[in-house]
Amino acid sequence: MLNKIFKSSLIKASGVYTLSSIINAGIPFILLPILTRYLSPEEYGIVAMFSILLSIMGVFTGLSVHGAINRVYLDSDKFNFKEYVYNCLLILFISSILVFLIVYIFKSYVSKISGVPSFWVSCVVVVSFFQFIFLSTLSIYQAQMNAKVYSFVQIFQSTLNALLTIVLVVMLGMGWEGRLIGQSVSVIIFGTILLIYLYRKWITPRINKLYIKHALKFGIPLIPHTIGGMIIMATDRFMINNMLGLKEAGLYTAGMQIGMIIGILTDSFNKAWAPWLFIKLNENRREIKLKIVKLHMVILSAC
């Protein structure tokens, strides 16, 4: 039985996610020689530091409650899912305003330590807001185990990002600003489209304090873990930037991008594994749980 379930859903979804991840990783990889040709190491360093700031701001805009959307979808008998999504977006709006005010006050200091101009430091929060919308919609598709639509949306956004970058950097010669505009505009466009989609299909506008509390209880404890990951990921580039300069930070990031390809397979499998696992655990059957444990042992032994 386990083999039948595993082959019919998990492996197929994992295959789609893998293909999607390869394409998504391939797009910036193809862009890499273009950017390194048309951008100086210092300019590429600004681009790299902007991406790091975007990751850091993403921890606080929305407070990681998009993960709760994924989990609650599987408990539709306990929650009104459309109300829950609305209350998560309410958390996003409030937290984004607070983060924007804090960043705006300290933007000069953030600009100094990151090397990103003040204007773009403020823009990071706006882009992070729409990125949360993007991630929330992807969470719904992942919970539905709809790997094809998930992959299509992800690939389409990455493609638009790349095309805008090529036009602005290569054809119009806008340098690092062209790259940041391309990256930001693609996220904002897709975030706006998906926000309209969520409003029409997945939102019932009703404030529910219990849902807000539940989402915050899910998301806030994840923040220290996420911050720890950000520190591990970003400390090296912040140190290189402040000790050696943007040029060296840019060169370091270009080399690091090549090595990131290794994580594609594990990330793709996890995207398929997580919703499948929760669905099976919700069945609350002893034989399924035993088979899941055995499957975990097989995966661990393979690793």
Image: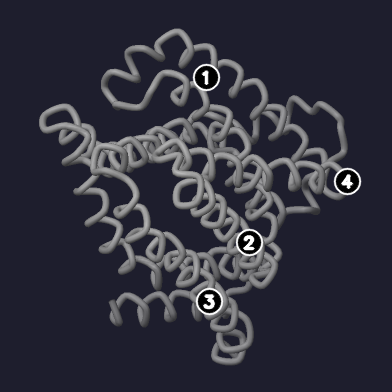
* Badge nearest the viewer, 1 or 2: 2
CA distance separating discs 4 and 2: 21 Å
Disc 1/disc 2 C-alpha distance (Å): 29 Å
Eye-nearest disc, 4 or 3 = 4
Q: Point out residue 193 in the picture as x, y percentages from the top left corner.
A: 76, 46
Q: Disc 4 and disc 3: Cα gap in Å?
A: 29 Å
Q: Residue 14, labelled with which disc?
A: 3
Disc assigned to residue 156:
2
Q: Secondary structure at mark 1?
A: helix
The residue at which mark 1 appears reads as 99
- In the image, is 122 to the left or to the right of 73? left
Q: Which residue position is annotated with label 4?
A: 200
Q: Quadrant of the C terminus?
A: bottom left
Residue 85: where, in percent of width, then height?
A: 75, 41
Q: Which residue: 64% across, 52% down?
A: 70
Q: Earlier in the sequence, mark 1 or mark 2?
A: 1
Q: Nearer the viewer, mark 2 or mark 3?
A: 2
Q: Which label was assigned to residue 64?
A: none
Query: How busy is the neighbourhood of tag 1: few (under 14 within 10 Å), some, or many (20 plus)?
Result: some
Q: Amino acid at mark 4?
A: Arg
User: In which quadrant of the rendered view does residue 192 lie?
Assistant: top right
| Lower sequence index among marks 2 and 3 | 3
Mark-to-mark CA distance, 2 and 3: 19 Å
As helix, strand or loop, the secondary structure at mark 4 comes to: helix
- Spatial CA distance of label 4 from label 1 is 27 Å
